[in-house]
Image (cartoon, rainbow, N blue to C red):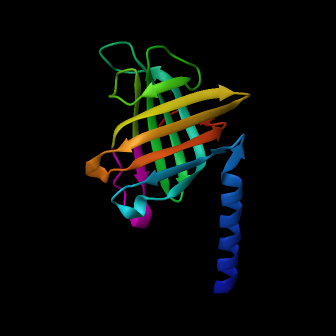
Amino acid sequence: MSKSFFLSVLSFSLIIILFTGCSKEDGEVYNIFSVEGCSIEEYNADYLPETVTYIPSRLCQCENVMYRTDIQISLYPSAAIILEVYNASAVTTIPEGTFTMGESCNVGFTAGFYPNPGGKTQGLSFSSGSLTIEKKDGDYYIAVNLSIEQESGGGNLIGNFKGVPSEMTSR
């Protein structure tokens, strides 16, 4: 195959992803995550959700009764956001509400972001943030606003997903 044919197919694919990946309703942009202000410049980019999966709540081994739901957002280009949501009661799907970043085994959530530009696999750690999960008309709206720790380069990761996550049975 010729190089120009390959580049044409790649360009066309990227255009389709960009136009179908982000949607705009009522002035709100959905389905995009952005790393901004990080001193590790190659991480500063917009990322589009490719797949969103979750593991329903299950009892954790904590001192107090606590349930954990895992949400994984696979992104384009090559990256992932891992969210662990801790709740005092079990839910059959994804817990709804606004959660504050905290530590494992406490009501709230923990997060990790794993970009992979050029084969790098070190993730970004966060110092604080919020997670909002709502379900409306069969779609989930999952929004994050996270502050990246200075040791990881500082800056912010903000963005959201609107759609239907698929259930995983284990991680």
Q: Give the side of residue 117 with respect to residue 7, left or right.
A: left
Tell me the magenta residue range. Answer: 112-125
Residue 144 location in percent, x, y? 49, 38
Residue that appears at 65% across and 72% down: 10
Residue 54 location in percent, x, y? 55, 34
Q: Give the side of residue 35 with respect to residue 17, left or right.
A: left
Q: Give the side of residue 28 with respect to residue 59, left or right.
A: right
97 lies above or below 125: above
Residue that appears at 56% across and 26% down: 94
Residue 151 location in percent, x, y? 25, 50
Q: Give the side of residue 29 with respect to residue 128, left or right.
A: right
Q: Nearer the viewer, residue 156 or 13?
A: 156
Is residue 99 a member of the stretch shown in magenta? no
Q: Looking at the figure, which quarter contains the N terminus?
A: bottom right
Residue 171 location in percent, x, y? 47, 37
Q: Quadrant of residue 52?
A: top right
Q: Nearer the viewer, residue 127 or 116?
A: 127
154 lies above or below 61: below
Q: Quadrant of residue 36?
A: bottom left
Residue 47 visible in the picture: yes
Residue that appears at 67% across and 85% down: 4
In the image, farthest residue toward the left:
151
